[in-house]
Amino acid sequence: QVQVVESGGGLVQAGGSLRLSCEASGRIFRLNDMDWYRQAPGKQREWVAGIARGGSTRYGDSVKGRFTISRDNAKNTVYLQMNSLKPEDTAVYYCNAKIWVLGGRSDNDYWGQGTQVTVSS
């Protein structure tokens, strides 16, 4: 019914940049908040950043000033621009979208499969 797909991960040197994308598709009535999370090996999943449908943004302390979240509502897509990357940013990055599907009564959480980001020192 609904798919959430991340892309844009890869290997980058410390200090470099990457841009992640997350596109939602399917029988979507309304796409509400979209968030990025990450999970490093042996650690719990960590919230990174979020953006409301209207565009207001919020960031975790560890990425504030380095990462920028944005969205294109016409494309049902959220982006995460990551600058000044550090080895500790290495993780699988997941997209979470709150989607109200056609015929539904409210929104629900949908997760992507994740994209690997590796930052070498």
Image (spheres, grey):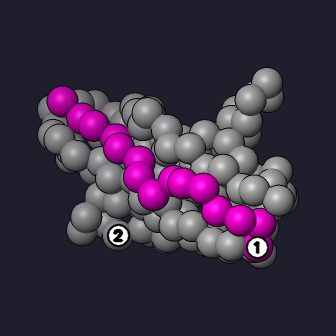
Which is nearer the eye, 43 or 68? 43
Residue located 34% across and 41% down the image:
4
Residue located 73% across and 36% down the image:
40
Q: Is residue 102 visible?
A: yes
The answer to whether the residues at label 2 and label 1 have Cβ atoms under 8 Å apart is no
Residue position marked by numbered label 2 in the rendering: 72
Residue 81 place in picture, x, y as percent: 57, 70
**View extreme (top): residue:** 42
Residue located 82% across and 51% down the image:
88
Q: Which residues are magenta?
A: 1-15
Residue position marked by numbered label 1 in the rendering: 15
Q: Please tell me in which quadrant of the rendered image residue 106 appears.
A: top left
Residue 65 shown left or right of residue 16 in the figure:
right
> Is residue 6 a member of the stretch shown in magenta?
yes
* Label number found at residue 75: none
Residue located 15% across and 40% down the image:
27
**Mark-to-mark CA distance, 2 and 1:** 27 Å
Three-letter residue code for mark 1: Gly
* Main SS, magenta residues: strand
Which is nearer the eye, 44 or 49? 44
Examine the rendered structure and indicate whether residue 20 appears above or below residue 43: below
Residue 77 place in picture, x, y as percent: 35, 60
Which is nearer the eye, 36 or 51? 36
The 10 Å Cα crowd at callout 1, few under 14, some 14 to 19, many 20 or more, is some
Residue 103 place in picture, x, y as percent: 15, 32
Q: Please tell me in which quadrant of the rendered image residue 10 appears.
A: bottom right
